[in-house]
Amino acid sequence: MLIFKVVKQDGSPVKKAKVTVAVTNGGNATAITDRRGFVSSPITGGSYGKVIVNGTEAYEGSLVDLETVTLSA
């Protein structure tokens, strides 16, 4: 299970955002962030992929040690 936090550039949590984790050569999983900006998502099929927040790609890379995704302006 992948658990990470989604934050704005100022460090404040992103609440109730739709987050999709797309694993390269694997599956996709979608979840909603909680009031603290945390989201949990199952990852299957690999350890590399993309994190998409509200339809915009926010991260691409290793999902193994992912702790925080910071949204760009």
Image (cartoon, rainbow, N blue to C red):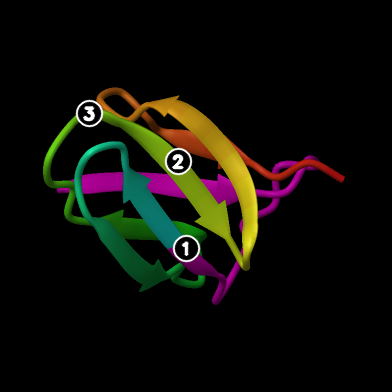
Label drawn at residue 19: 1
At 51% from the left and 59% from the top, the residue drawn is 37
The x, y position of residue 54, in whole percent, is 62, 67
At 49% from the left and 36% from the top, the residue drawn is 68
Q: Callout 1 environment at 10 Å: few (<14), some (14 to 19), or many (20+)?
A: many
Nearer to us in this view, 68 or 43: 43
Magenta stretch contains residue 69: no
**Magenta residue span:** 1-19
For badge 1, the amino acid type reads Val
Residue 10 vertical position relative to residue 13 in the rendered view, above or below: above
Mark 3, mark 1: which one is toward the viewer? 3
Nearer to us in this view, 4 or 29: 29
The x, y position of residue 32, in whole percent, is 43, 73
The x, y position of residue 1, in whole percent, is 14, 48
For badge 3, the amino acid type reads Ser
Mark 2, mark 1: which one is toward the viewer? 2
Residue for badge 2: 50
